[in-house]
Amino acid sequence: MVAGHEYGMKQIPSDDWWDFQIEDMATGERVDTPMNSK
């Protein structure tokens, strides 16, 4: 993450689990790592 940037959290529904991703509001770039990668 970059200081001074605004970040948003987005829910990603799946069949059997929920994932959250954090993205940079300015660029839309994902800045986290998936918690449950298949």
Image (cartoon, rainbow, N blue to C red):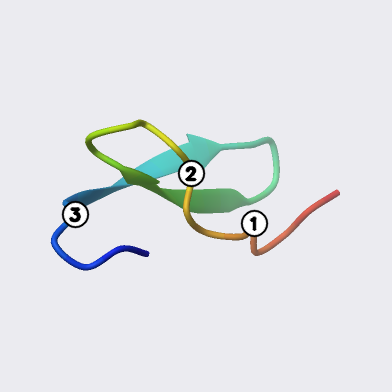
Of mark 3 and mark 2, the one earlier in the sequence is 3
Can you say whether 3 is above or below 32 in the image? below
Label 2 sits on a secondary structure element that is loop
Of mark 1 and mark 3, the one earlier in the sequence is 3
Q: Dividing the picture into quarters, in which one does residue 35 lie?
A: bottom right
Q: Which residue is mark 2?
A: 30
Which dot, 1 or 2, sits closer to the camera? 2
Q: Which residue is mark 1?
A: 34
Q: Which residue is mark 3?
A: 5
Label 1 sits on a secondary structure element that is loop
Q: Nearer the viewer, residue 35 or 30?
A: 30
Q: What distance separates the C-alpha of mark 1 from that of mark 3?
A: 20 Å
Q: What distance separates the C-alpha of mark 1 from that of mark 2?
A: 10 Å
- The image position of residue 11, as x and y in percent, is 41, 42
What type is the residue that disc 3 sits on? His
- The image position of residue 38, as x and y in percent, is 86, 49
